[in-house]
Amino acid sequence: MIELAAAILCLMGCLVMLISTLGLFRFPDIYTRIHATGVAPSLGLLLLLLAAFLFFPGWWMFGYLVVMITINFLTSPLAAHLIARAAYQSGLPLCEGSKCDEGIRGEQSLPNDADS
Amino acid sequence: MNWVEILLEISAGILFLSFALSLVHLYQGPMIMDRINALNLLGNLTVGVLFLFGFLQRDLHFFEIALILCLVSFIPIVVISHFLVWRYGK
């Protein structure tokens, strides 16, 4: 029964990762695509880690779970932030529906609602 | 074949589909940032694939490889991003 719950968690984690991958193709600009790939895989990995803990219960796996969650939740947002910063500083545009650009090139690129 | 194995094999299929789609995005681009983004996702997906191998084989060694990969997979992203900021940054 516990293995079945672990397999369901594993399936959910893989589905979250698939949704994240589909976000690469569906979202309009690089920044939203970075959001899709930077946030969702962490949740997918968390579900996979919980499945691993259910598959192999014990202190070793608990320690592994804590270390892995710590590492992943530190490195994944860092990588996403660095990609977004590089994209922004390279001058890649936001998508057309964007309302606000609060970065260093804010006033030049996009009009505010108040201006129009 | 019991339900656990069926669910794990469905999970493997989903994960390999994600892997293939990420490789397509890595190949297509069109911008270099898209490729780096796909590379970042591929690192996470590889960790997921290693987990799945660990489940299917009932082998804990895959988890240790996944831990090391999770530790090092973001380093190329950091390096390439810093290079791009240095090269094309305004």
Image: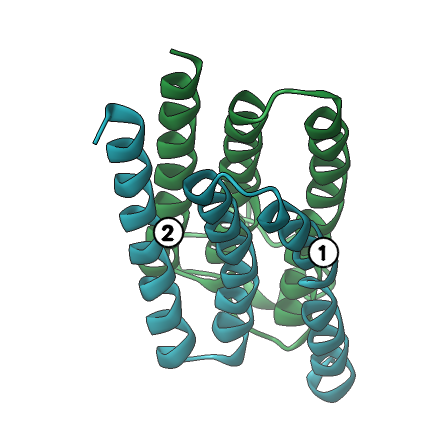
Chain colours: A green, B cyan
Q: Which residue is pictured at 55% across the width and 52% down the height?
A: B47
The extreme left residue here reads B1
Q: Which residue is pictured at 50% across the width and 62% down the height?
A: B42
Pointer 1 residue = B68
Q: Amino acid at mark 2?
A: Gly
Label 2: chain? Answer: A
Point out which mark residue B57 bears: none
CA separation, marks 2 and 1? 27 Å
Q: Is residue A90 above or below residue A47?
A: below
| Numbered marks: total | 2
Q: Which residue is pictured at 56% across the width and 72% down the height?
A: B36
The extreme bottom residue here reads B87
Residue A111 shows up from this direction: no
For this rendering, which residue is in front, A7 or A84? Answer: A7
Tell me if B34 is positioned left or right of B80 in this view: left
For this rendering, which residue is in front, A110 or A20? Answer: A20
Q: Quadrant of the N terminus of chain A?
A: top left
Q: Is residue A101 above or below residue A62?
A: below
Q: Is residue A66 above or below residue B58?
A: above
Q: Do dots 2 and 1 share one subunit?
A: no
Residue A106 image point, x, y percent? 66, 60
Q: Nearer the viewer, mark 2 or mark 1?
A: 1
Q: Amino acid at mark 1?
A: Ile
Identify the element where label 2 is drawn: helix
Neighbours of disc 1 within 10 Å: few (<14), some (14-19), many (20+): few
Residue A66 image point, x, y percent? 75, 30
Residue A78 shows up from this direction: yes
